[in-house]
C-alpha cells in the first residue's frame, strides 16, 4: 500500500545505498582493474577504466620477479613465510585458548578472576610497549629474524583473545552435560575431548578465522622482528610499494596488494558470518 | 568436582607467558623510559629527563597534534557514518546481506593492502585527480596526500572507510535489540519515524555507542600500519602519529629511552580509555552472572 512519498523515499534509500556500496567497492575495483593493465595505460589513462589491453604480466612480476628490498624475488617467498607463520600460530593459539577457556570456566580456582582481568587488558595494549623487551628476548632465544620467532610472538599476544573467546563460550555451556559426564567418572581430558570440544565447532571456527585474519594482516611485529629472509607478506608488500628506487610500477603494486588480500578475502567471502561474530565477540569482551 | 593439580598445571604456562611478556615487558619498558638507554637498553637511572625532552620535541608535538585530529575525525566520522549505514540497512531492504557484506569487507583486509590502494587512488599524478580530468572534469583537484597540511585527512578517509562497516554492525546489533513494544507504543501515540529514531531508539543505543567509542579510540592510538602504507609519515613528518614516533626514535634514531617514554604514554592513553570501560563491563558481568 506504499504511497507516492513512500515510494520516492524507498527509491532514494536504494539510490544512496547503491552509491555508497560502489564507493566501498571502489578501492578494490581499482586494485583489480589496474593490476591487469600495462603501465602506460595507468600513467596516461583513467584509473577507473577497464584495461584496453588485458595483461597478467603485473601479477607474474609481483609474484616472482619484483624487487623486494635488494632481491628480485617477487612476493612468492614472503607469501610462503606468511603461511608458515599463520598456520602454526593460529593452531597453537586456538588450542591454548580452548584449554584455558575450559579450565577457567569449569574449575574453581583462586585467582581465576585476576587471570581473566589480566588477559582482558592484554588484548588492548599498544604493542609498542612490548617491542623493545621482546626484541631482546627473541635475540636471547636465537629467534630474532626468524619465522619461528614471529610464530612465538603472535601466539603470546594471541592467547588473550583466544582464551576470552572460549571462556565466554564455555561460560554459557549447559552445566547438566558437564555434571552428568562427571558423574559417569569422566576425567579432565575426557570431559574436554568428549563433551566440550565436540560442541565447540562455532567458537573454534570463529577463533580460527579471527586469528587467521589478524595474523595474516599483522605488520608491526613483522616489521620489527624479521629480516629479508623471514618477512611476512605485509612487510614485503610495503617494501615493494614504498622502496623508491626506479620507476613506480603501479600495476605491479596493485597486483601485489591483491595477492596479499586474497587469502583473507576468500575467508571473508566463504564465512563472513563467523568473521562478524568474531568481531562482535572481540568488541564486547565482558 | 575437586580442582586437581592438572588444570592449574595446564593454565600455568599461559599465565606465566602473559605475566612475563605483557606485564613484565610493560614494567621493563616503563623502567627504560627513566634510563639513559640509546642504541641498546641499559639500566642506568636518569629520572624524568626523557619525558622533559619528549615534550620539547617538535616531532612529538606534531605526532600528538595529528593524533587529536585523526582520533577526533576517525571516531566521529566512523560513528556518524556507521549509524547512518545501520539505520539505512535496518529499513527492511532487499539484499540486506549483500549490503552488509560490502560495507564490512574492508575489515578483513590488511591496512597495508588498503593503504596501498588508497595511496595511489589519492595520488594526484595517477589517481582520482588525474582520472576525473581524463574524464573531462578539467578543473578537478585532489592533491591532499601530497600536502603537509591535508595529508592527515587522507589517513582519516582511508581509516573511516576501513572501519565504518564494523561500527555499522555494532549499531545494527543494537538497533535489532531495541524493545519492539516501546517502538510500536510510540507509533500508536502518533510519533513519526524521525521522532521514533531520535526519542526512542537512539537513546537505547547507549551501550553500543560506548563500545564503539572505546574500540575506535584504542584503534586510533594504536594506528600505525595504515600511516606507514599510505604516507609513510610524510610528506616530511606531517602524518606522524605517536606510534610512528615510537618506532622512529627507538629503532632508527637510537633514542630508545625517549621511544620507551612515548610507548609508555601510548599505553597510558589506552588505559585511560579502556580501563573504566572494562571495569564497568566486568561489574555488569559479575552482577548478572
Image (cartoon, rainbow, N blue to C red):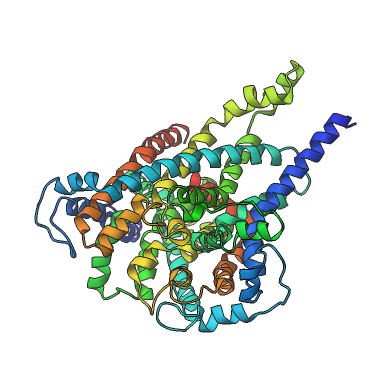
Q: Vertically, is A71 above or below A39?
A: below
Q: Position of residue B260 (x, y in %)?
A: 24, 54
Instruction: Please name whichever residue, B61 or A174, is drawn nearer the observer in this view of the structure.
Output: B61
Q: Vertically, is A232 above or below A192?
A: below
Q: Quadrant of residue A28?
A: bottom right
Asked if residue B265 can be seen in this view, the reply is yes
Asked if residue A179 can be seen in this view, the reply is no
Name the residue at 52% across, 33% down: B207
Q: Vertically, is B84 above or below B196?
A: below
Taking A93 as reference, is B154 left or right?
Answer: right
Name the residue at 33% across, 59% down: B14
Q: Position of residue B287 (x, y in %)?
A: 44, 31
Instruction: Please name whichever residue, B222 or A249, is drawn nearer the observer in this view of the structure.
Output: A249
Q: Position of residue B284 (x, y in %)?
A: 45, 33
Taking B80 as reference, is B28 left or right?
Answer: left
Q: Position of residue B75 (x, y in %)?
A: 49, 41
Taking B41 as reference, is A62 left or right?
Answer: right
Q: Which residue is outermost to the right?
A: A1
Q: Vertically, is B161 above or below A38?
A: above
Q: Which residue is outermost to the front?
A: B138
Name the residue at 56% across, 57% down: B122
Report the label total: 0
Amino acid at each position: 500500500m506504499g504511497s507516492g512519498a513512500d515510494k520516492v523515499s524507498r527509491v532514494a534509500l536504494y539510490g544512496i545505498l547503491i552509491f555508497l556500496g560502489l564507493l566501498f567497492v571502489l578501492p578494490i575495483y581499482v586494485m583489480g582493474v589496474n593490476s591487469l593493465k600495462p603501465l602506460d595505460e595507468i600513467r596516461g589513462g583513467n584509473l577507473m577504466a577497464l584495461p584496453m589491453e588485458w595483461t597478467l604480466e603485473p601479477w607474474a612480476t609481483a609474484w616472482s620477479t619484483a624487487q623486494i628490498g635488494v632481491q628480485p624475488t617477487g612476493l612468492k617467498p614472503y607469501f610462503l613465510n606468511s603461511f608458515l607463520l599463520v598456520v602454526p600460530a593460529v593452531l597453537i593459539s586456538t588450542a591454548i585458548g580452548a584449554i584455558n577457556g575450559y579450565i577457567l570456566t569449569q574449575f574453581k580456582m583462586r585467582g581465576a578472576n585476576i587471570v581473566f582481568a589480566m588477559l582482558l587488558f592484554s588484548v588492548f595494549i599498544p604493542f609498542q610497549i612490548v617491542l623493545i623487551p621482546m626484541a631482546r628476548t627473541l635475540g636471547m632465544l636465537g629467534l630474532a629474524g626468524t619465522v619461528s620467532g614471529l610464530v612465538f610472538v603472535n601466539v603470546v599476544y594471541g592467547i588473550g583473545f583466544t582464551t576470552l573467546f572460549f571462556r565466554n563460550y564455555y561460560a554459557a555451556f549447559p552445566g547438566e552435560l558437564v555434571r552428568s559426564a562427571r558423574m559417569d567418572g569422566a576425567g579432565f581430558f575426557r570431559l574436554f575431548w568428549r563433551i566440550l570440544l565436540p560442541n565447540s565447532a562455532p567458537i573454534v571456527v570463529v577463533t580460527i578465522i579471527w586469528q587467521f585474519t589478524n595474523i595474516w594482516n599483522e605488520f608491526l611485529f613483522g616489521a620489527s622482528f624479521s629480516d629479508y629472509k623471514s618477512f611476512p607478506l605485509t612487510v614485503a608488500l610495503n617494501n615493494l610499494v614504498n622502496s623508491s628506487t626506479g620507476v613506480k610500477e603501479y600495476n605491479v603494486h596493485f597486483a601485489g596488494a591483491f595477492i596479499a588480500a586474497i587469502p583473507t578475502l576468500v575467508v571473508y567471502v566463504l564465512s563472513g558470518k563467523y568473521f562478524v561474530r568474531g568481531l562482535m565477540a572481540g568488541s564486547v569482551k565482558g | 568436582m575437586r580442582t586437581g593439580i592438572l588444570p592449574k598445571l595446564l593454565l600455568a604456562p599461559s599465565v606465566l607467558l602473559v605475566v612475563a611478556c605483557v606485564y613484565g615487558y610493560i614494567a621493563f619498558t616503563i623502567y627504560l623510559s627513566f634510563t639513559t638507554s640509546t642504541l641498546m637498553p641499559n639500566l642506568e637511572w636518569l629520572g624524568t629527563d626523557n619525558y622533559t625532552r619528549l615534550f620539547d620535541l617538535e616531532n612529538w608535538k606534531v605526532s600528538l597534534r595529528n593524533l587529536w585530529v585523526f582520533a577526533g575525525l576517525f571516531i566521529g566520522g566512523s560513528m556518524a557514518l556507521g549509524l547512518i549505514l545501520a539505520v539505512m540497512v535496518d529499513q527492511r531492504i532487499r539484499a540486506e546481506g549483500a549490503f552488509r557484506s560490502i560495507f564490512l569487507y574492508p575489515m578483513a583486509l590488511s591496512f597495508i593492502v588498503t593503504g596501498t590502494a588508497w595511496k595511489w587512488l589519492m595520488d594526484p599524478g595517477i589517481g582520482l585527480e588525474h582520472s576525473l580530468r581524463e574524464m573531462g572534469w578539467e578543473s578537478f583537484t585532489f592533491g591532499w596526500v601530497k600536502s603537509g597540511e591535508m595529508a592527515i585527512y587522507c589517513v582519516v578517509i582511508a581509516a573511516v572507510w576501513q572501519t565504518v562497516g564494523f561500527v555499522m554492525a555494532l549499531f545494527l546489533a543494537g538497533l535489532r535489540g531495541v524493545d519492539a513494544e516501546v517502538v510500536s507504543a510510540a507509533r500508536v501515540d502518533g510519533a513519526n519515524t524521525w521522532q521514533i529514531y531520535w526519542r526512542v531508539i537512539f537513546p537505547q543505543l547507549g551501550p553500543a555507542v560506548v563500545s564503539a567509542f572505546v574500540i575506535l579510540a584504542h584503534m586510533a592510538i594504536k594506528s600505525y600500519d595504515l600511516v606507514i602504507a599510505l604516507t609513510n609519515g610524510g610528506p616530511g613528518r606531517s602524518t606522524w602519529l605517536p606510534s610512528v614516533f615510537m618506532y622512529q626514535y627507538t629503532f632508527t634514531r637510537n633514542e630508545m629511552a625517549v621511544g620507551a617514554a612515548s610507548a609508555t604514554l601510548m599505553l597510558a592513553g589506552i588505559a585511560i580509555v579502556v580501563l573504566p570501560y572494562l571495569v564497568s563491563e566486568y561489574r555488569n558481568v559479575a552482577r548478572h552472572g
